[in-house]
Amino acid sequence: AAKWLGNYARTINRKPILGRGNPAADSAYRAGEAYFSKWERNPIARLNPSEVQDAIVEYTRAIDLADDNVRLRIAALLARANLYNTLGRYDEALADVRMMEELGIGDLPSLMLIEAMALEGKGGSEYLKRAISLLTWGLQLEESDWMPRPEEMHALYRIQGLERRAMAYFLLDDFPRAIQDSRRALDVLSHSG
């Protein structure tokens, strides 16, 4: 998920997000991306918490300095929310989701995945049910309803959505549905070439 979200944040709508406003915001965003890229290259090792915090500080600076560059602000919020989830700071991740919604993010799949991750992380039956509801709605969207993206991104979104929903079902002890979604994710993977 980290690699996919990072790639999306850098190629949002295939239009540049840097060089459209405050150079200090661009610089802060690039600094945050340096940490995020390190994580993408080796997600198993994960960044140590101080590196994640350093990336969060840089993304926060980019958000604060972005002025009217909404695309940069959204990309930084997307990356920062993902990092908050990594640190278990789920309320802060959900706050970033709300800010992205207020800014009018056009990429529902990324938004829903990050929100579902935070809800699952918070745990508890009510949060897990909300995550399942959100992911079920997202998985029912027609691909034409999404922001245009390469075909492999559609498959990856479906796999990630099914994987997240399977985990929520698992945490609710609904093992038949967890297994069913896991099988569906494998089916999508086998047909995505």
Image (cartoon, helix red, strand yellow):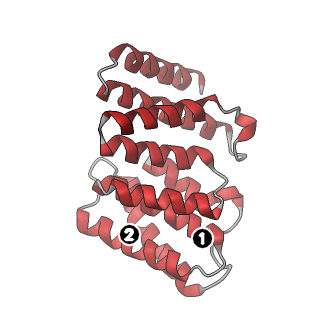
Is residue 37 visible from the viewing direction of this image?
no
Residue under circle 1?
Answer: 72
* Mark 1 Cα-neighbour bin, 10 Å: few <14, some 14–19, many ≥20: many
Q: Which of the 4 image quadrants contains residue 38?
A: bottom left
Residue, disc 2: 56
**Element type where label 2 sits in the image:** helix
In the displayed structure, does residue 90 sit left or right of residue 99? left
Image position of 190 with respect to 121: above or below: above
Give the quarter of the figure containing the N terminus. top left
Of residues 188 and 122, the one drawn nearer to the viewer in this rendering: 122
CA separation, marks 1 and 2? 15 Å
Q: Position of residue 193 (x, y in %)?
A: 59, 27
**Label 2 neighbourhood size at 10 Å, few (<14), some (14-19), many (20+)?**
many
Q: Residue at x 59, y 57 (%)?
A: 101
Image location (x, y in percent) of residue 58: 42, 76
Give the quadrant of residue 109. top right
> Residue 52: percent from the left, percent from the top?
31, 65
With 54 as the anchor, is 162 left or right in this view?
Answer: right
**Residue most toward the top?**
176
At horizontal 70% and vertical 58% (from top left) the residue drawn is 14
Please provide percent x and percent y for residue 77. 50, 64
| Residue that sits furthest to the right in the current view | 144
Query: Between residues 163 and 138, which one lies in front from this camera angle?
Result: 138
Q: Is residue 191 left or right of residue 185?
A: right
Q: Amino acid at mark 1?
A: Leu
Q: Residue at position x 55%, y 24% from top?
A: 188
The answer to whether 39 is drawn above or below residue 58 in the figure is above
**Amino acid, disc 2:** Ile
Q: Is residue 75 visible?
A: yes
Q: Secondary structure at mark 1?
A: helix
